[in-house]
Image (cartoon, helix red, strand yellow):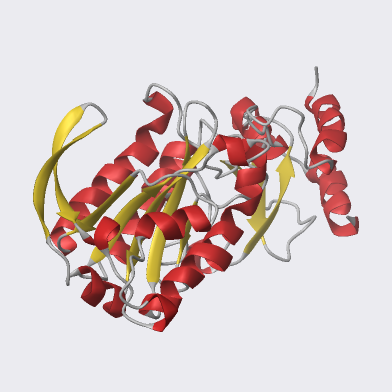
Amino acid sequence: MTLASLEQSWKHELHDSWRGDPLAPLELPSVQKCQRGGMTLVTWPAGHVGDIGVKFRASCLYCGSWRCPRCAYGVAMQDLRRLEAGVLSRGWWLYAVLTVDPAAWENPWEVYKMAGHLWDKRLRKRLERRFGKLTYVQTWEAHRSGWPHLNLLIAGDGLQRDVEQYAHGQRTAIKHGRPRTCHWTAWRGSRKATAGRLRGKVDRWSDWIEGSGFGRMKWLEIVDSPAAAACYLGKVAREIGATMWKQGDQRPLNAPRHFRRIRSSRGLLPLADADLRWDSCRGWYQLSQDGGLYEGVLVNRPIESVDPGKLSWSELLPLIARRTTA
């Protein structure tokens, strides 16, 4: 089967947001092309289309998707640097793991579609009514069953003051079958409201998350310091990067197109710009290299079969014409 025929078969499937099997991985055309190694970016100095003697450059075109087996590790390393910069910019965090109740949803696809609403319009509003403005970082993962869960870091001056009013301390807990020291807090189950009609009554974390559409409480602890946050972040980032080799891939591969598995407060995480990309891993050429601008087209061949010295304008001009009339 040719790449062109594959693209034709994908068109109808991608037009419909419902894929039939909510547990099946979403196979995007760009990821499929990248896996097949079928695309090469050919560039030349800008403004020199058709010039005889121009030197072409060829580079392997990677899709840059966290869904792609070829690109996932490089993307994870980029995400690590962004997450590290954002989390270490705060000195106090509360860490939670949130699940969903499968009985309350038709399928995992619907949960992914509602992920932003569950947090932004429901749980975050509940929290900010009580504690004021919050800063957050979250990563979405998939359980082996295909149902998603959320790793959440939240911080805020009002939240910190409220949490620290309650008993807390170091405890040993069994997590993933192994003992681990964590910073337990009585706030999660014993908190009482300090204002409004609930003043003096129990007003708990577990009630907020379940009332917002999440499942029963799985985990909540205080992250002690920037150093502890860095250690925790290293663990999370390592798992994101190594998830393909874990027993049970935890990337949300069955999520809809454009699903953002990493979300944060505006401006907290650095942009994924050239300074943070691992370009040597991902194989991208910058179009402003060597003090000049470059333009290019995609050649539907793997880079191994493209010799820049043997390329000709007669081969590239139809691709250029298609690009300019598209």
Relative to 159, is 180 above or below?
above
Residue extending farthest top = 1
Expressed as whole percent of the image width and height from the top left, the position of residue 245 reads: 38, 24
Q: Residue at x 57, y 35 (%)?
A: 102
- Compared across the picture, whether 194 is left or right of 255 comes to left
Q: Residue at x 88, y 55 (%)?
A: 326
Q: Nearer the viewer, residue 110 or 242?
A: 110
Expressed as whole percent of the image width and height from the top left, the position of residue 233 reads: 27, 51
Q: Nearer the viewer, residue 146 or 305?
A: 146
Q: Is residue 55 visible?
A: no
Quadrant including the N terminus: top right
Q: Please count the marks in the image.
A: 0
Q: Nearer the viewer, residue 310 or 59?
A: 59
Q: Is residue 319 visible?
A: yes
Relative to 13, is 2 above or below?
above
Q: Nearer the viewer, residue 171 or 48?
A: 171
- Compared across the picture, whether 115 is left or right of 164 comes to right
Q: Residue at x 60, y 28 (%)?
A: 35
Q: Residue at x 85, y 37 (%)?
A: 11
Residue extending farthest right = 325
Expressed as whole percent of the image width and height from the top left, the position of residue 185 reads: 19, 57
Expressed as whole percent of the image width and height from the top left, the position of residue 91 reads: 20, 70
Relative to 106, is 189 above or below?
below
Relative to 95, is 315 above or below?
above
- Compared across the picture, whether 226 is left or right of 289 comes to left
